[in-house]
Image (cartoon, rainbow, N blue to C red):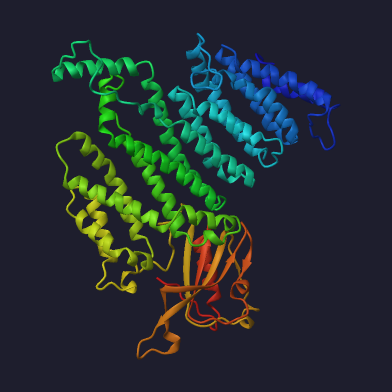
Amino acid sequence: LIVSRDRDKTATATLHSGSQFMLHGQGIFVETESSHVEVWFPVFLALSNGVLDDRESIRSASADGVLSLLRQYGLRFTGGFWMWLFRGVLRPMFDDVSHLPGGPHHSHVDNESADTHWSMTTGASILRQLVDVLLEHGVFTRDEFGLFSDMLLLLRGWILQQSEPVAREGVVVLRHMLCELSTKLKLSDEQWISVVDELCLLVDQTTPSELVVTIPDAQLERNDSQHTLDDETLEEELSKAASERLGKDIDFRVIRTKCVTQLLLIVLIEDFIGCHYLQLSNLHLLRLSECVAKCFQFARNFNRDLNLRVYLWKSGVMSQVPNLLRQEMTSLQVLLSIRFWMFCDTHRAHLPKTDSVIESGNSVFSETQLFELVFDILETFSNGFRNRTSDDSQKSEIDALAPVVEVVLRRLNALPASILAKYWQSIFRALISLIECEYVGVRRTVAKVLNERLPKDLSVSQLMKTSESTITTSNLPPGIKLLRVSAQKGWKTDSMSSNQVSLPRGIRSIAILSAATENSANSSAENTKPVIDKVKVLERLSLEENQEISIDTIFGDDSKSSCVFEFYGTFDEKLLMGTLSFVTEDSSMPLVLNG
């Protein structure tokens, strides 16, 4: 079966001849039927053994055989049959990976390099395609036996490897499952919790805690004479002592692997939230936010401890003074994204999945925390470029912080006028100080903010951006949209009966807001325009995923005047605006799209 050129035909013919007597019900294979197991087990066992063969051609043929059988017959396997197959045959194929350094069953063997090569070639290919097959057949959706948790555990064994290439490949496959195949990933609430728990565990396990060591006193143990050493001799003895202390405890390759892996995981968390934002509860987002915040704080504390960094360098473990700048800045940017998303998204609290945890969310995360972090970043950067010396390390820190400052300024520029007005004095002072910096990108972003938001006075209406009342996405995750539409006249239900229109899918929440109006002396009531930034929520309608909704459901029975309608979700804005344009053809229901 393995060496045959027509291996797929042979496998199919063998299974067809042996499966006529073992079909159960509607052609479903079950683990409790001994005849099913007796035919399938030898086939998969033989192929799985071939996957571990020393000859590449045999490994490739065996891997193709396993995957082609799973694709062809996987839909006919029950959840229990998949569990038996995964735990008895598929998962053991990757046992050699668990014996590599960093794996849960690490043992010193002579062929570690061969196992690493297998992991990066045959093993990685099978792992990725196995995820494709499991998602294609919806195995995780009907997962009453915990197969999804088993898959996460298998990937954990790859990601926590001391070999950087193997760990990278593990993160790539996890990203493939969580993000690139996000449309096929239909999970239960318990499974979403499992994913969040696993991501937090992986980030914690890849923290390079080995870098935090106790620095001995400068006064070394000496002989009874207690003579004083000159600086050069003292430094030489300190280096020697540090080398002796750290050489046995710190492996630079392990530290590098952890740093690289954690960076990939931090970026994965941001992308994961972006792909599944509406499926994750506030509690999930808070846990992931806290996880990233711990990475940021660890890296920041390490970077600010110059004595520790110099000590590690003098120990000979590092070829230069180490730093975790990429760790600090990457985690800071992701942390800002998550916190801005949660702060600016007023609709999340009213979605069915997040309503039960919003109270606990408010107790952990607040507006004050967000803006304390924002102003700390701006102040650190401003003080850094003003007081910068010729120290190369200080220059590197300021250079690394500049892109983060640009992100912060863009986020602030996208805030609603009512929020921006509360902090405008502090923001304005920060903007003026940043004009003097030498970083072109920062100065251009400052100019953009001042050009778009600088008021003639400090009223809220003067701070409002002209585009604020249309599609808003800057402070929301990718794909999440917020469309505001103003109505100049009242709505009447009786006029809707002949003009009912179904809105496009993807709308998850609709808010009806009352708006203050501004009247000129010569304007009539019909020309009254709502002021979008002075609003109060009158009604809110939260929808399930892909729930259909029609216009008359939104408007209800009461007529309303000077209203603003807010549509929130993953809808197609062109399709929605086309629908709204169709509604406006009835002269009794004028709709004005702001902007």
Q: Which quarter of the picture shows residue 416?
A: bottom left
Please determine whether, in this image, residue 319 is positioned above or below residue 413: above
Please determine whether, in this image, residue 301 is positioned above or below residue 502: above
Q: Residue at x 28, y 20 (%)?
A: 315
Q: Residue at x 52, y 58 (%)?
A: 348
Left or right, 498 with respect to 80, comes to: left
Please determine whether, in this image, residue 491 is positioned above or below residue 407: below
Q: Residue at x 51, y 35 (%)?
A: 201
Q: How many marks?
A: 0
Q: Quadrant of the N terminus?
A: top right
Left or right, 36 with respect to 295, comes to: right
Closer-to-camera residue (198/583): 198
Left or right, 235 with respect to 256, comes to: left
Q: Which quarter of the picture shows residue 448?
A: bottom left
Closer-to-camera residue (237/325): 237
Q: Which quarter of the picture shows residue 57?
A: top right
Q: As drawn, which residue projects farthest toward the front?
A: 224
Please determine whether, in this image, residue 549 is positioned above or below residue 250: below
Q: As drawn, which residue projects farthest toward the top?
A: 110
Q: Position of residue 435 (x, y in %)?
A: 19, 55
Closer-to-camera residue (364/329): 364
Does residue 286 appear anywhere in the picture? Answer: yes
Q: Position of residue 485 (x, y in %)?
A: 47, 71
Closer-to-camera residue (203/411): 203
Q: Residue at x 43, y 56 (%)?
A: 366
Does residue 321 appear anywhere in the picture? Answer: no
Q: Position of residue 306 (x, y in %)?
A: 25, 32
Q: Position of residue 228 (x, y in %)?
A: 15, 17
Q: Quadrant of the C terminus?
A: bottom left
